Structure formats: structure tokens, C-alpha cells
Amino acid sequence: MILALAAAGTVRAQAQAPQYPCEQNERFAEFDFWIGDWEVHGPKGKLAGSNSIMSREHGCVLTESWTGASGVTGMSINYLDHATGEWVQVWNDSSGSQINIRGGLTDDGMLLVGTIHYVASNQTVPFRGLWTQLDDGRVRQFFEQYDAENDAWNTWFEGFYTRKAAE
């Protein structure tokens, strides 16, 4: 009987909840400036690749699909961990890089911090990424990897995202 009442309460609570809660919570839109189809160039203008960022699951998840000019491909899933209030990115690519970072909005943009793991060398090191929406509509993505030997953060990737023209 108690189990039946508990189940009924759960059903009632679910029935009263918004059908798509992520669409109705502005926190889930904090990374929406990154959504779109992009060409990505390095700081000196050289094409680094293309990236497609899509909102999925009614605003609960962003997916990333990267194709580098060098032929490396990769993908990530990005989501707001509502329990902790942190944004999370989990990335894997064809070269064997695995990134697991988390964080949130700062005055400079979306800052996520964690680790990168290299499958080939079985090495894991501190890693961080910053996405900044620029005034001209572009997005700057800046990744750094920590070098423990020199006690310094070194640039791992810097890219400037420009929206692709509509086809």
C-alpha cells in the first residue's frame, strides 16, 4: 500500500512538472551563443576546421560535431548538470583525445576546467577551455593545457568561430 501511494505521488509530481523543463529554465540557455554551423579559423586566419553545434532534447543538451582541416574529427556533449549547477563538456576525437571539463559563466565567457586524457600515451593532464562571445558575432574558443614541469598553462588551441553563410 505504501509503495502504491509513493508511486502515485511520483506520477502526480511528474504530471505537474513542465513537459520540457530545460526550455523553461534560462540556465539551460547560457551556452546557446555557441549554437550554429561555424567555420573556425586560427588567430592568423588559417582555416582550422568546421563545427556544428546543435541544441537537442528540448534544450537540455548541446552536441558538437567537429571536422578539422587536418582530417581529425570529434564530438562532444555539453549539458548543465542541474544538481551541481555546473556546465559539463565530454569530448572525444579520432586522435584519441578525451576531454572532461566543467564550470560555468564568468565575466569573460563560459569557462570549463578539468582534464584532457591522451589515449595513445595514457597521459592525463589539467585542461581548461574558455568560450567568449565577441561583439562582432564571432565566438572565440581558447583551450589551455597545464605543463607541470614548467608550472605554466600553455595554449592548446585558439579558434575564432564565424557563422557559415546560409545555403
Image (spheres, rainbow, N blue to C red):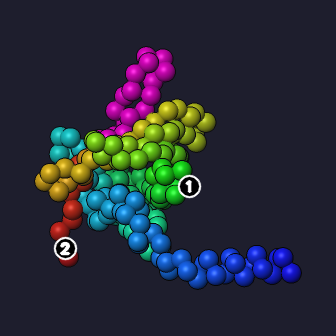
Q: Is residue 101 visible?
A: yes
Q: Residue 70 in the image: state x and y as whole percent.
A: 35, 50
Residue appearing at x 49%, y 78% in the figure:
18
* 101 up-or-down from 69: above or below: above
Query: What's drawn in magenta, residue-wise?
Result: 142-159
Count of numbered badges drawn on the protein: 2
Residue appearing at x 17%, y 68% in the figure:
165
Q: Residue 4 in the image: state x and y as whole percent.
A: 81, 81
Q: Which residue is mark 1?
A: 83
Write down the quadrant of residue 145 in the picture: top left
Using a 10 Å C-alpha cutoff, classify the residue at mark 2 as few (fewer than 14 neighbours), some (14 to 19) or many (20 or more).
Answer: few
Q: Amino acid at mark 2?
A: Ala
- The residue closer to the viewer here, 51 or 133, is 133
Cα distance between the residues tagged 2 and 1: 37 Å
Question: Residue 166 bears which disc, if any?
Answer: 2
- The residue closer to the viewer here, 149 or 101, is 101
Q: Is residue 47 visible?
A: no
Q: Residue 100 in the image: state x and y as whole percent.
A: 52, 46
Give the residue furthest to the top.
150
Q: Amino acid at mark 1?
A: Ala
SS at circle 2: loop
Q: Main secondary structure of the magenta part?
A: strand
Which tag is nearer the camera, tag 2 or tag 1?
1
Along the polypeptide, which appears first: circle 2 or circle 1?
A: 1
Residue appearing at x 21%, y 65% in the figure:
164
SS at circle 1: loop
